[in-house]
Image (spheres, grey):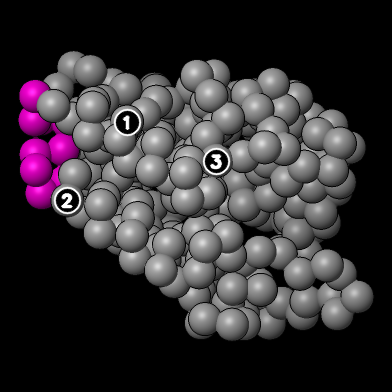
Amino acid sequence: MSASAIRVLGRPGNAHRIGALAIRSLHAELVLYPKPGLVSPRDNGSHADMDATTFLRSMASLRGYFVAIASAGAHGAPFRELRSLGVRAEQRMLEATGGVNTHRGAIFALGLLAAAAASVLAEGSEATDARLRDVLGRWRTDLLAFAVDPTARPSHGRSVAGRFGAKGARGEAISAFPSVFDTGLPALRLALSRTSDVAAAQVHALFTLLALVEDTNVIYRGGPDALAFLQREAIAFLTAGSIFAADWRSRAEWLHRQCCIRRISPGGCADLFSACWFVHQLQADA
């Protein structure tokens, strides 16, 4: 990142820029296809209660949130303030979607990354992987000490964590998002270095996440067997050449159909993909 780019991203409008990148990342995830079991403009995936329009309404409700949490991050706000912004954003999302959970995981993960990005750039530093993870590490103690409201309805991730020991979104955040920085982003960068087809490179990154991440949404809907099936088939897709094989699209579409039949929806991986694309954009646009 050049010094001039740092100055541009560090201006007062930086929070708005980061907020726009966050929404753009959510939109990139929505329109991506083939995408096993997930909603896209092509179809509703394995879901009967939501479609692409539901996601667009959700995104519209979150525009102000990502700007606000980026601004809070830039000013060194404590974790409790970031959490409060996330809680209010989730309420607005549910109001916009009629109670359907479209982006709860993204509100948490992408929100923290937006705050971290704004903090790094406000310091005049480059938004490298290492610097972003350094800032995320500042909230580790707060995340470990986070007390869950016993009267609140448990999230899918919390339910699965209690039953099966999967770490979920909170575990990712406590470890500064290893699935983003150690898995998804390296896969995305490799694919982009080998092809000019951005959508195909995104599919490669998503399938890499599917192969390696213990997606709590998959476990919640289908149990450990569903996760084992998804990971096995994602690994087979990658082993067969991924997007660099001639038949990659038909193979990816086959897995999409199978996930729809089995009601498998890897929403956790979708959120992590959005996070990967956010970091990629943040660094590329500089």
Q: Is residue 98 left or right of residue 56?
A: right
Q: Which residues are drawn in magenta?
A: 238-246
User: Which residue position is annotated with label 2?
Assistant: 236
Residue 9 horizontal side relative to residue 73, left or right: left
Quadrant in the picture for residue 152:
bottom right
Residue type, mark 2 in image? Ala
Q: Is residue 130 visible?
A: no
* 10 Å crowding of disc 1: few (<14), some (14-19), many (20+): some
Q: Secondary structure at mark 1?
A: helix
Residue at numbered disc 1: 253
Precedes in sequence: disc 2 or disc 3: 3
Res 198 → quadrant: top left
Name the residue at 42% across, 26% down: 32
Q: Position of residue 119 (x, y in %)?
A: 57, 48
Q: Which element type, helix, strand or loop, lies under badge 3?
A: loop
Residue 182 drawn above or below residue 50: below
Give the Cα separation between the discs numbered 1 and 2: 14 Å
CB within 8 Å, label 2 to label 3:
no
Which of disc 3 and disc 1 is earlier in sequence?
A: 3
